[in-house]
């Protein structure tokens, strides 16, 4: 009985190998004609081959990996449609559950090229189950949750999981803290940034962590002052004219310092609390971005845009930016954009 089973399994393996050989030959012949969908249906299911490969799963997976890459390349150059991508990467990782590159590349293809975010998530979760010590897979999964799903909470969870694996790079800790902050878990994010600041010997990373901590502290202070402004309004029936009114009204002992060296103001129109350092920083970034777009427009058209709206029409910016607490202006004759804080108009 055992010999019969062995013979049957060998025959199945030979059939599978022949199928893969047929795929290889056909794809080599039609390498970039784009007509490879039918050929790839010769790939049997991973679970079937896993029972039949007699220990050659990794070898077969390697061959399928090369053909899968060729399949992707052919379609990337032609119709950019990948109907068999999910089947290919699922089969490869069924055959070789430790094939990390197949999980990572498959996740990217499924999420970014195919638009099958759910399939990408399932593939990476399968990889995490099979490779519980690899930081790359939860990191990639966190990235998909953050970018494609806009789910900061789940992204933070998987970034955090990646950061606790064996020898993860420091970027996993940075992404963890960033995602927790975006998810609204400010205290957790600040603690993680502080931990990274205290533990790293890399000056660049230490400076980035310090800046992140300051930004979190600034956000926290603005939120606290905004709550006091609303409380002032409820008590007096009007908004405070300036931030120091909160102290005079007994709502605050003192106004906290801006961690970037600026001060706090109240927008006279929106009644929002503003940080002068943040307004100046956002204004500078806005001018830098617009200047690059204007220069590019000038190179393409031999003239400056008639308005900032024309930059949008030309596809060089998504929208004309607005910076609260600053006035945006554009001089057509010189092609110069400015964004100047208007403190005298903000404070009334």
Image (cartoon, rainbow, N blue to C red):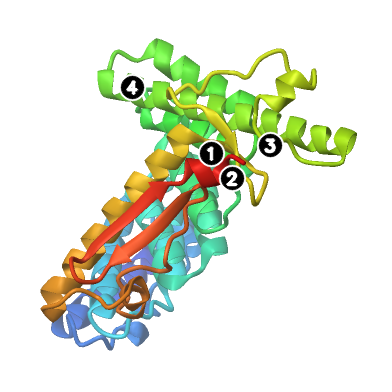
Q: Quadrant of the C terminus?
A: top right
Residue ID for mark 3: 241
Instruction: Identify the residue at image location x=56%, y=19%.
Output: 191
Which is more N-terminal, label 4 or label 1? 1
CA gap, disc 3 and disc 4: 36 Å
Dot 2 crowding, Cα within 10 Å, few <14, some 14–19, many 20+: many
Percent position of residue 25, x then y: 18, 79
Question: Which quadrant of the figure has residue 230?
Answer: top right
Left/right placement of residue 332 relative to residue 101 reads left
Using the image as rendered, state which of residue 178 and residue 291 is in the foreground. Answer: 291
Q: Secondary structure at mark 2?
A: helix
Residue 63, how many percent across, how many down? 26, 61
Q: Which residue is mark 1?
A: 179
Q: Nearer the viewer, residue 138 or 284?
A: 284
Q: Are marks 1 and 2 in contact (CB under 8 Å)?
A: yes
| 215 to the left or right of 318 | right
Could you tell me how far apart the alpha carbons at marks 1 and 2 are, in whole angstroms?
5 Å
Left or right of residue 246: residue 90: left
Could you tell me residue 75's position as x and y percent?
Answer: 29, 79
Circle 3 Cα neighbour tier, 10 Å, few/some/many (<14 / 14–19 / ≥20): some
């Amino acid at each position: 009985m055992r010999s019969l089973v062995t013979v049957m399994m060998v025959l199945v393996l030979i059939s599978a190998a022949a199928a893969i050989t047929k795929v290889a030959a056909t794809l080599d012949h039609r390498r970039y004609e784009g007509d490879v969908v039918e050929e790839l249906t010769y790939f049997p299911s991973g679970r079937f081959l896993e029972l039949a490969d007699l220990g050659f799963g990794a070898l077969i997976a390697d061959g399928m990996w090369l053909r899968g890459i060729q399949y992707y390349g052919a379609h990337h150059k032609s119709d950019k449609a990948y109907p068999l991508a999910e089947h290919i990467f699922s089969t490869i990782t069924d055959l070789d559950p430790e094939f990390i590159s197949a999980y990572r590349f498959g996740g990217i293809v499924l999420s970014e090229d195919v638009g099958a975010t759910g399939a990408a998530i399932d593939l990476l979760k399968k990889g995490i189950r099979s490779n519980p010590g690899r930081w790359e897979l939860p990191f990639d999964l966190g990235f998909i949750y953050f970018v494609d799903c806009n789910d900061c909470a789940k992204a933070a969870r998987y970034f955090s999981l990646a950061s606790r694996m064996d020898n993860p790079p420091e970027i996993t800790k940075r992404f963890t803290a960033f995602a927790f902050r975006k998810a609204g878990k400010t205290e957790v994010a600040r603690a993680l940034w502080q931990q990274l600041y205290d533990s790293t010997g890399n000056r660049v990373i230490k400076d980035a962590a310090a800046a992140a901590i300051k930004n979190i502290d600034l956000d926290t202070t603005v939120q606290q002052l905004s709550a006091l402004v609303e409380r002032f309004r409820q008590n007096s029936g009007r908004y405070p004219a300036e931030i120091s009114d909160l102290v005079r009204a007994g709502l605050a002992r003192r106004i906290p310092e801006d961690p970037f060296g600026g001060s706090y103001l109240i927008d006279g129109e929106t009644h929002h609390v503003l940080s002068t350092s943040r307004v100046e920083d956002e204004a500078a970034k806005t001018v830098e971005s617009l200047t690059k777009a204007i220069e590019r427009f000038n190179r393409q058209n031999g003239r400056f845009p008639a308005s900032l709206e024309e930059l949008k029409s030309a596809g060089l910016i998504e929208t004309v930016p607005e910076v609260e607490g600053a006035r945006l202006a554009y001089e057509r004759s010189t092609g110069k954009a400015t964004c100047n804080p208007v403190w005298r108009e903000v404070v009334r």
